[in-house]
């Protein structure tokens, strides 16, 4: 039988609930348990796919093609456990199915109400994690205790525990213990009040995880234990980590949170293996090969969460190469105003990420041109690939006015065009080309060298694609089409031969990168940037970038500094 852990948040949002939940999942997994994860989001959108990244950050895409909350990215990166459509439910999605069933007459003439019909639907969503071989399911409730929108979810988890019993479900509340500078003190009152709110709903947390800037003293723990009705040893401190989010599991493990969880759930406490994780964190904290600076040129730069998975995947690429990554966040509209050269001066590589709409496109194209003409390692992702294709068409193939039909429907050279099956699409939600698709890789290319294989599977989220009408002409001019979707002959990866490293892909490799296993394209992009940073001799040709001389590379880099 699957046991359930529910993670709620108190006092304020942005406490890193997702990270904490993911860290707990990692610890349980490293004790040999099979874990699944889920996020319940209280907003009314059916999924976050139609929301601007400025709202809740990036939209994370699962292998089965669901557009989901970015916390699922943490779940997958920390645990390596795949998420699916079942891993993210919103109020909108819950209500949609309740209303659809009401229209079908499913409720047999009853009045349809929040309790029990909506809460039943939520409980069913939670139970969708149960199944063969799943030992523990962790469900994170979005929002903050006290939000009107969260109420049905909190009521549902209260009922759930009632249904399955105390030994089979656990409540963890993540809360804030702020440091008040003027008083020079940590304050426990907000957390007491937050637990008070939960209590009025009938939920008493078993474990309290306290986010704080400064260490909790004994007296704080005693006070929180007393007022919140939690055992003192189950008041856990989660202080801001010094270097990296990947330190969080180590901090929690040091306080045996996972041991307490297993004990409360009546499960055997087996040994914890964090050896690989610790090694990875060590490399992150003190990279032997020095620093590499990568420019990310996008239009959602002012919100860090908008490119979350990209930044993480770059960090993973750094770990794989033993270098630290510094990210220079460049607003594409600034490139339009000031030119690429001053804004990209001194960087070791340029990445243009995905996006929608024409704002900032000219700046992205200018950044691509700068990277192509100056031999700067370049990595384009989704819209970034489309920009690379447009730039190559204009700058190398002489197709003046080449564009994507997304930005200029009457372009004389629509090198990027709407996919055939997208032409009839009217609804925006969930209708892009989404999720995992196969990609066949051409031998003797940078892509083949990176993957070390001639076939892979990558996740997608786009409506437009490379227009095959122009493939011959662009290939003749030197663009290599190194990845294709075998089922439909769609272009998946393009690259340039006469350049130290210029690769762009239509899919989103950042969704499959983890700190223990960097995505091959991120790993090789960072390696090329590290070579540039160390001013190692640049050699062209795909076989050169595949040599596995990581150790000597990083020594060379250190010497070069
Ligand atoms: N806007 C482009 C498209 O729809 C690219 C999408 C993306 O970068 N995710 O094809």
Image (tube, rainbow, N blue to C red):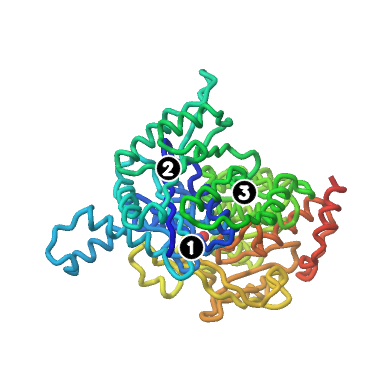
Quadrant of the image containing the N terminus: bottom left
> Distance between the Cα atoms at labels 1 and 3?
24 Å
The residue that label 3 is drawn on is 246
Q: Which type of secondary structure does the marked residue at label 3 adopt?
A: helix
Q: CA distance from mark 2 to mark 1?
A: 24 Å
Name of the residue lying farthest toward the bottom: 487
| Residue 60, above or below 179 | below
Report which quarter residue 491 is drawn in. bottom right
Q: Is residue 422 above or below residue 186?
A: below
Residue closer to the observer: 430 or 283: 283
Q: Which mark is residue 102?
A: none
Residue in front for this viewpoint, 480 or 561: 561
Residues packed near mark 2 inside 10 Å, few (<14), some (14 to 19) or many (20 plus): many
Disc 1 crowd rating (10 Å Cα; few below 14, some 14-19, many 20+) is some
- Quick one: 241 or 6, which is closer to the camera? 6
Q: Which residue is mark 1?
A: 135
The x and y percentages for residue 339 are 63, 46
| Residue 445 placement (x, y as % from top left) | 71, 73
Q: Is residue 101 left or right of residue 375?
A: left
- Count residues near mark 3 (Cα–Cα under 10 Å), then give few for <14, some for 14-19, many for 20+: many
Q: Quadrant of residue 500?
A: bottom right
Mark 2 highlights which residue? 9
Total numbered labels placed on residues in the image: 3
């Amino acid at each position: 039988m699957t046991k359930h852990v529910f993670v709620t948040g108190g006092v304020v949002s942005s406490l890193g609930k997702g990270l904490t939940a993911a860290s707990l999942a990692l610890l349980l997994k490293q004790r040999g348990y099979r874990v699944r994860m889920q996020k319940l989001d209280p907003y009314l959108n059916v999924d976050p796919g139609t929301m601007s990244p400025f709202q809740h950050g990036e939209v994370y895409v699962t292998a089965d093609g669901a557009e989901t909350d970015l916390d699922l990215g943490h779940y997958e990166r920390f645990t390596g456990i795949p998420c699916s459509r079942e891993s993210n439910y919103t109020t909108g999605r819950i209500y949609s199915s309740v209303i659809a069933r009401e229209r079908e007459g499913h409720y047999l003439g009853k009045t349809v109400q929040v309790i029990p019909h909506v809460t039943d639907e939520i409980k069913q969503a939670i139970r969708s994690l149960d199944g063969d071989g799943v030992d523990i399911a962790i469900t994170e409730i979005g929002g903050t205790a006290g939000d009107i929108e969260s109420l049905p979810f909190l009521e549902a988890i209260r009922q759930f525990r009632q249904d399955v019993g105390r030994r089979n479900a656990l409540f963890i509340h993540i809360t804030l213990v702020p440091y008040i500078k003027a008083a020079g003190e940590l304050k426990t009152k907000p957390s007491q009040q937050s637990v008070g709110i939960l209590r009025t709903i009938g939920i008493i947390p078993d474990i309290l995880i306290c986010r704080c800037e400064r260490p909790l003293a004994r007296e704080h723990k005693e006070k929180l234990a007393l007022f919140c009705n939690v055992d003192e040893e189950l008041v856990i401190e989660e202080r801001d980590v010094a270097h990296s989010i990947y330190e969080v599991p180590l901090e929690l493990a040091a306080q045996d949170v996972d041991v307490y969880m297993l004990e409360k759930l009546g499960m055997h406490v087996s040994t914890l293996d964090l050896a690989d994780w610790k090694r990875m964190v060590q490399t992150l904290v003190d990279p032997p090969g020095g620093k590499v600076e990568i420019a990310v040129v996008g239009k959602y730069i002012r919100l860090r969460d908008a490119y979350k998975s990209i930044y993480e995947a770059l960090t993973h690429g750094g770990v794989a190469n033993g270098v630290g990554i510094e990210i220079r966040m460049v607003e594409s509209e600034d490139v339009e105003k000031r030119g690429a050269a001053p804004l990209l001066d001194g960087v070791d590589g340029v990445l243009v990420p995905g996006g929608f709409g024409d704002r900032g496109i000219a700046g992205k194209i200018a950044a691509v041109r700068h990277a192509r003409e100056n031999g700067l390692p370049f990595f384009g992702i989704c819209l970034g690939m489309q920009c690379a294709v447009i730039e190559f068409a204009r700058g190398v193939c002489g197709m003046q006015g080449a564009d994507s039909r997304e930005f200029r429907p009457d372009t004389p050279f629509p090198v990027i065009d709407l996919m055939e099956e997208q032409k009839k699409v009217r609804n925006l939600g969930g209708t892009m080309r989404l999720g995992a698709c196969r990609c066949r890789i051409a031998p003797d290319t940078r892509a083949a060298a990176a993957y070390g294989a001639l076939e892979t599977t990558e996740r997608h989220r786009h409506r437009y694609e490379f227009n095959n009408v122009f493939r011959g002409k662009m290939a003749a001019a030197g663009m290599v089409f190194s990845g294709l979707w075998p089922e439909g002959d769609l272009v998946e990866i393009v690259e340039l031969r006469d350049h130290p490293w210029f690769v762009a892909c239509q899919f989103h490799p950042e969704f499959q990168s983890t700190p223990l296993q960097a995505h091959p394209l991120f790993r090789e992009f960072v390696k090329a940037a590290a070579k540039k940073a160390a001013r190692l001799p640049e050699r062209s040709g795909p076989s050169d970038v595949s040599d596995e001389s990581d150790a000597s590379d990083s020594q060379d880099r250190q010497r070069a500094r």
